[in-house]
Amino acid sequence: MKNIKLIEVPSEIGAGTRGASLGVDAIKIAALDFMSNFFVHFPSEKIETVNNILFEPIHSPYAKRIQGVLTMYERISKAVSDSLKNNFFPVILSGDHSNAGGTIAGIKIAKPKSKLGVIWIDAHADLHTPFTTPSGNLHGMPLATAIGEDNADNKVHDLDEKTARIWNQLKEIGKITPKVLPEDIVFISLRDFEKEEKALIDKYGMKVISTTEVRRNGPENVSRKVLRYLSDCTDIYVSFDVDSLDSTISKGTGTPVSNGLREREAEDLISKFMQSRKVCCFEITEVNPTLDKENLMAEIAFNILQRSVNIVMMN
């Protein structure tokens, strides 16, 4: 039986829309509304944020608040790494998706010899770099830091020296670069990305499974296919961005996109992944209750969280 540890990361400095830092508490409120005592059952750790820098001027337009994101990478990676070393299964409840870069670093620091696979359930590829970003928001870049990629071939911007230096520190955190090989990443329900990201997906032949394929073949067949594809990996990290859900239900997130997963499809899919003993870490991210009605997004996220954790505990 696996010991679960909840790691709360209410950091939203990587996002362009405000409010994701409230997502963790919104999920807890959803649990209360369901009269669930889920959050009493497990040890938890809350990572101190630097959300105060949201009130300060932006110094790096192509990598907004990058110094703060580096601080969060360091804190998150230590918490995740310590949890794994102490034989916990870390479940991360995260504000914005930039935090996932710290999670991946933490897994590799704890398991440096591991061949890590990543299942990225998200409408977006999050493969931008400060050289290619259209927005400058770091929540669009965590996978680029994980694979140690600048994407210089598709460069749009020139960086100042300080931004370039901190970007390199993000990629090199834990003194392991890359943390994950591009071919060991599987995107699910990816449907909103720029040509610079597409160039990386094509360059490395990265695996993409569309919403249509999930719907046509069913979560069970898709999960089997993904786990078979990652069969060489010794450990697998599952990252669930709630904007992978269709925009008709994912109102409570900063970047909703149409043609996404239905709630039950996402829940069934993640539950199937959690049955694999290789899965060592799970993250839910980008719930933003300020954009929501009646806390619906957080309720959906809590249902998925609760079912997933129950399965992990039984494994």
Image (spheres, rainbow, N blue to C red):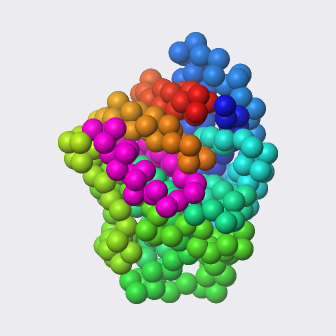
| Residue 222 visible in rendering | yes
- Which residue of the protein is positioned furthest toward the top in this rendering? 35
The N terminus is located in which quarter? Answer: top right
The C terminus is located in which quarter? Answer: top right
Q: Position of residue 295 (x, y in %)?
A: 47, 27
**Along the viewing direction, whichever of 130 and 123 lies nearer the viewer:** 123
In the image, what residue occupies the spot 28% across and 44% down?
214
Q: How many marks?
A: 0
Q: Position of residue 183 (x, y in %)?
A: 43, 68
25 is within the stretch colored magenta? no
Q: Position of residue 98 (x, y in %)?
A: 56, 58
240 is within the stretch colored magenta? yes
Q: Is residue 78 left or right of residue 55?
A: right
**Along the viewing direction, whichever of 78 and 86 lies nearer the viewer:** 86
**Along the viewing direction, whichever of 243 and 15 lies nearer the viewer:** 243
Q: Quarter-wise, where is residue 41 in the image?
A: top right
Segment colored magenta: 218-247
Question: Is 69 located above or below residue 79 in the figure?
Answer: below
In the image, what residue occupies the spot 46% across and 56% down?
231
**Along the viewing direction, whichever of 139 and 277 lies nearer the viewer:** 277
Q: Is residue 186 left or right of residue 48?
A: left
Q: Position of residue 81 (x, y in %)?
A: 73, 54
Q: Quarter-wise, where is residue 314 in the image?
A: top right
| Residue 69 visible in rendering | no
In the image, what residue occupies the spot 75% across and 43% down?
87
Question: Is 208 located above or below residue 7 in the figure?
Answer: below
Question: Is 172 located above or below residue 246 in the figure?
Answer: below
In the image, what residue occupies the spot 50% across and 86% down?
158
